[in-house]
């Protein structure tokens, strides 16, 4: 079924939709450029404050060349530009990538074309460029509506810029607009989170992603904490998460994945498909691709990435081959993140019946029924996934 | 060799005072070992010995020495373990000698362990040569060390031989002192055979190899001999000496030291301290001093993975081939499943056995807190021997509990006397004698419950004296004490592996500390876990590990599912170090938490 029709027809947390999403084909484009590195970030990025402005045109040329080297995949149902900061790119460069994808793979009718945008990059003129380039969906890196938290997160915008961006996106005619929020930074208080939630609701966006702040090793944040700065607290994060879910559902948002909430018809296809174990091609620095039972990954260093492309080679640094059983494990691990859960396959059933599985069910974290295995306490997803991976392994 | 030209001696020294280096140097100087074959600690053959710089098994090596006056001598160096845990083995090794070198580090002086072994040597009637080692160190104070030695042994500080085992300085003087000062053996070559077994080890190809000192008569291949304590007869397959490589000689005569092979596979038959005599027309009286190995410390050893129980049994059986003092019996714990209660000679012995099981047999083990041997006097008049808190009878049947006391000797720089006294008193120690070895160093004697030592006493002593104090102890007596068993309940279920016997006065403090420690060590679970300490049915402390509320990470970077999966798998691997106790996951460190609870 055409993704456009199905996302409109089924609610975001529908099992039917999740199963359909497993058959969608997506593309991910990594845009590594950032005005500077945020203190919590460990992604493969190019910090333009440190090395001066990188040459966007050369990079996009390389990405287009990489797309040209890819084997056929079939028409794409969703394309996502992630980063880094994709909105650092001029619309013409985005258009060039979309053109290359269209030539190489083709685009489905009504394909979702999404882009992450930082509020400080937005102008209505830029937005019109995005529309011309073919973008249909924008996700705004709002992160918080509390200036103190934005500052602590190292973000460059103020809360007003978020509202301006949302209304700008609407004005230029982009059909789906969402915001990303990060919660649980020690600089955030219960009251400021409450205000952020209220502000987010007032904007009446179509989609909200809420991510708990995670301390990754090697980041400035982790160094600060080692030096004695307060660390995020699990209990506080759990409280903030549940509070958001309560308020958002009262405003018509449906949680379809641990961190993702959409109004009817606005589920992010790229997102849903990834968790539903769909296939995707991925291009650019440090990008990860998944198809035909293989997970491949690209160089994380810009010079190596560009060097490989220049030499006419695919910029791969690693590949993982997964047999049917290991793909089944991945599907279970990923599907457990979805509100719709994962089909109760023989592997999933073995897990549900295992000692660990029964403990989670007893504790009210997991449920099995109606042909699905689903987590009802999303904050405990990794605890379940960890056991699910090992139980299915031991039983085979 | 003419008996008058034989010298049998051992070296007594504290750990790190240079015993093995001195042995190396003696072997090298006399040409017993070529430069090509020389390596450090040549007599310590076990990896663990070389790594820790300690001697666990005894060894004996024959050295040919031509004295300054041209006379040829046969020197037998008997290398002994120095540690208090092996004091019985040490006493047997000393019994095989006529003399001993009492070696002290010129910068450290006399230590408790050295002193204990020196007293043992003096009591055994050995001639002692005081030796001051490491005289070339910057911090060396050879005169003070020599003064301490003369204070202990009597005699003149000038008697001490000054050496540097490292550089070889003074080694010639020492060799001359050995032949001049130490007496030759005095056995009767024509009398029936009496030979002392002072150590034995298991060789995969040759079976049990015994190290022996022939006191009277001779030991010859092809003869039949009798082990007098065990009452077992054996054929002498092979006799020889170690140089340190094995050299077959066919016989050993009175005064000589060497090895004996009989093809016996069971090391339990050939016990240290037993006397060998002729099977036919043998001696009527054995040599004195035989004793059965007596474990002092007991600990439960359980495989982390219950499937490894049989492997643990096999590993213990194999270790026992070389260590007849290792005693064990199968034990079942509600919390830890199937395992063994193992008896050890002391704390070092326990540590060594555990380490060898984990390293040489790749076993992952949970060890319970060490216990001592209690005697439970029952209301019905009976007495029950108890090797672990879980075996203690119910209070209704129990009249009183007796616990082992030990005589403790501590040598410390005098500036720490106050701190040492405080520590010992907090562990129910009773002050005995106090002697000054020198104005700076003092020897303190105490009577203390062994149970107070087996936890963290040695660590505490070391940390409070900046590592300067040394400790030695020996069994003294059993006494009735006011002891209670403190049980720990997880999720309202008593966990046998956590039970401990403590003095009544300390039970509350211990219960509180243990519960607090466990709350820190036990990770949050899917539900609240109450942790309680109880004496009988009375709860004396309680804390709760709150249920875990968040265990999820945010999005995957750029679709990197591989990394996500690997992270989860790694985390799961880490959880394998946990033991399921009922429905609670308990990390292995928790089972020895009691060890780390200080008295404050």
Image (cartoon, helix red, strand yellow):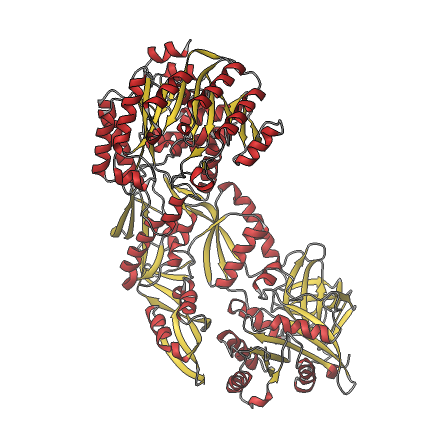
Q: Is residue A367 visible?
A: no
Q: Residue at x 34, y 53 (%)?
A: B517
Please say if B462 is above or below B340: below
Seen in the picture, residue B598 relative to B277 is either above or below; the reply is above
Q: Quadrant of the N terminus of chain A?
A: top left
* Side of B238 where B488 appears, left or right: left
Tell me if residue A56 comes above or below residue B424 in the rendering. above
From the viewer's perspective, tell me whether residue B496 is left or right of residue A238: right
Quadrant of the rendered image containing residue B399: bottom left
Asked if A275 appears above or below B539 in the picture, the reply is: above
The percent coordinates of residue B286 (x first, y second) are: 63, 73
Residue B283 figure quarter: bottom right
User: Where in the figure is residue B211, as x and y percent of width and height?
Assistant: 67, 67
Residue A92 visible to the viewer: yes
Seen from the viewer's position, the closer of residues A22 and A89 is A89
Horizontally, residue B475 falls left or right of residue B166, namely: left
Which sits in the foreground, B214 or B467? B467
For the image shown, how many numbered marks are present on the structure?
0
């Amino acid at each position: 079924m055409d993704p456009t029709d199905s996302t409109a027809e089924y609610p975001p947390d529908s099992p039917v939709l999740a199963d359909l999403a497993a058959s969608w084909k997506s593309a991910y484009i990594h845009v590594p450029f950032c005005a500077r590195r945020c203190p919590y970030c460990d992604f493969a990025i190019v910090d333009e404050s440190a090395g001066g402005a990188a040459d966007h045109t050369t990079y996009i040329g390389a990405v287009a060349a990489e797309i040209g080297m890819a084997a056929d995949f079939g028409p794409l149902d969703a394309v996502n530009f992630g980063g880094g900061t994709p909105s650092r790119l001029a619309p013409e460069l985005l258009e060039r990538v979309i053109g290359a994808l269209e030539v190489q793979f083709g685009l489905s009718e009504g394909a979702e074309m999404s882009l992450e945008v930082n509020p400080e990059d937005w102008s209505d003129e830029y937005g019109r460029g995005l529309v011309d380039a073919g973008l249909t969906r924008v996700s705004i890196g709002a992160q918080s509506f509390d200036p103190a938290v934005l500052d602590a997160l190292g973000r460059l915008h103020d809360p007003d810029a978020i509202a301006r961006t949302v209304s700008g996106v609407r004005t230029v005619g982009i059909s789906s607009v969402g915001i990303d929020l990060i919660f649980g930074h020690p600089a955030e208080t219960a009251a400021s989170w409450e205000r952020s939630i209220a502000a987010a609701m007032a904007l009446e966006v179509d989609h909200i992603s809420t991510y708990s702040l995670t301390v990754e090793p090697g980041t400035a944040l982790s160094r600060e904490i080692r030096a004695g700065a307060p660390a995020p607290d699990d209990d506080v994060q759990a409280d903030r998460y549940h509070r958001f879910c309560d308020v958002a559902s009262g405003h018509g948002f449906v949680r379809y994945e641990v961190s993702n909430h959409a109004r009817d018809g606005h589920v992010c296809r790229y997102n849903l498909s990834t968790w539903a174990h769909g296939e995707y091609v991925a291009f650019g620095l440090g990008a990860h691709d998944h198809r035909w039972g293989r997970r491949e990954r690209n160089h994380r260093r810009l010079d190596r990435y560009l060097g490989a492309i220049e030499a006419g080679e695919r910029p791969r640094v690693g590949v993982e081959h997964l047999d049917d059983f290991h793909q089944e494990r991945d599907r279970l691990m990923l599907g457990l993140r979805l509100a719709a859960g994962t089909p109760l396959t023989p592997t999933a059933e073995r897990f549900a019946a295992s000692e660990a599985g029964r403990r989670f069910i007893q504790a009210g974290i997991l449920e099995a029924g109606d042909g699905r295995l689903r987590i009802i306490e999303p904050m405990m997803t990794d605890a379940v996934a960890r056991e699910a991976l090992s139980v299915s392994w031991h039983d085979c | 060799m003419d008996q008058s030209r034989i010298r049998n001696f051992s070296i007594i020294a504290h750990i790190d005072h240079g015993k093995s280096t001195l042995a190396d140097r003696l072997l090298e100087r006399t040409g017993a070992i070529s430069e090509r074959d020389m390596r450090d600690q040549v007599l310590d053959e076990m990896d663990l010995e070389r790594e820790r710089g300690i001697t666990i098994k005894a060894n004996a090596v024959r050295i040919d020495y031509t004295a300054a006056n041209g006379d040829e001598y046969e020197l037998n160096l008997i290398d002994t373990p120095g540690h208090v845990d092996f004091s019985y083995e040490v006493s047997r090794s000393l019994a095989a000698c006529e003399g001993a070198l009492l070696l002290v580090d010129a910068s450290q002086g006399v230590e408790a362990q050295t002193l204990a072994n020196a007293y043992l040597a003096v009591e055994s009637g050995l001639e002692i040569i005081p030796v001051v080692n490491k005289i070339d160190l910057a911090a060396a104070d050879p005169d003070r060390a020599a003064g301490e030695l003369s204070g202990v042994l009597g005699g003149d500080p000038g008697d001490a031989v000054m050496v540097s085992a490292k550089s070889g300085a003074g080694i010639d003087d020492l060799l001359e002192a050995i032949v001049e000062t130490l007496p030759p053996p005095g056995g009767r070559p024509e009398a029936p055979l009496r030979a002392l077994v002072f150590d034995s080890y298991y060789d995969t190809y040759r079976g049990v190899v015994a190290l022996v000192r022939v006191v009277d008569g001779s030991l010859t291949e092809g003869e039949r001999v009798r082990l007098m304590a065990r009452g077992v007869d054996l054929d002498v397959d092979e006799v020889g000496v170690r140089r340190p490589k094995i050299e077959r000689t066919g016989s050993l005569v009175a005064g000589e030291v060497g090895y004996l092979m009989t093809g016996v596979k069971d090391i339990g038959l050939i016990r240290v301290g037993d006397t060998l005599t002729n099977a036919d027309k043998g001696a009527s009286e054995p040599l004195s001093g035989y004793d059965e190995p007596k474990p002092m410390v007991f600990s439960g050893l359980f495989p982390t993975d219950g499937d490894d129980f049989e492997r643990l049994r096999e590993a213990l059986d194999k270790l026992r081939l070389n260590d007849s003092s290792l005693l064990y019996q199968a034990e079942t714990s509600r919390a830890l499943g199937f395992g063994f209660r193992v008896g050890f000679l002391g704390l070092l012995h326990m540590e060594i056995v555990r380490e060898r099981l984990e390293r040489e047999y790749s076993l992952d083990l949970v060890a319970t807190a060490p216990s001592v041997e209690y005697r439970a006097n029952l209301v019905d008049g009976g007495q029950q021997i108890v090797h672990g808190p879980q075996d203690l009878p119910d209070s209704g049947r129990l009249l009183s509990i007796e616990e082992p006391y030990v005589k403790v000797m501590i040598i410390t720089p005098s500036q720490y006397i106050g701190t040492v006294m405080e520590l010992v008193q907090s562990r129910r120690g009773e002050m005995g004698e106090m002697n000054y070895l020198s104005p700076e160093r003092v020897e303190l004697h105490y009577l203390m419950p062994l149970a107070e030592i087996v936890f963290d006493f040695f660590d505490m002593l070391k940390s409070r004296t900046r590592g300067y104090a040394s400790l030695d102890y020996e069994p003294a007596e059993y006494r009735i004490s006011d002891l209670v068993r403190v049980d720990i309940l997880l999720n309202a279920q008593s966990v046998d592996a956590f039970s401990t016997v403590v003095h009544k006065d300390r039970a509350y403090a211990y219960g509180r500390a243990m519960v607090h420690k466990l709350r820190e060590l036990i990770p949050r679970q899917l539900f609240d876990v109450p942790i309680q300490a109880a004496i009988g049915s009375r709860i004396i402390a309680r804390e709760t590990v709150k249920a875990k509320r968040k265990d999820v990470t945010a999005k995957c970077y750029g679709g990197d599912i591989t990394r996500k999966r690997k992270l989860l798998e790694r985390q799961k691997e880490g959880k394998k170090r946990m033991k399921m106790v009922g429905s609670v996951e308990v990390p292995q460190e928790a089972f020895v938490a009691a060890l780390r609870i200080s008295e404050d």
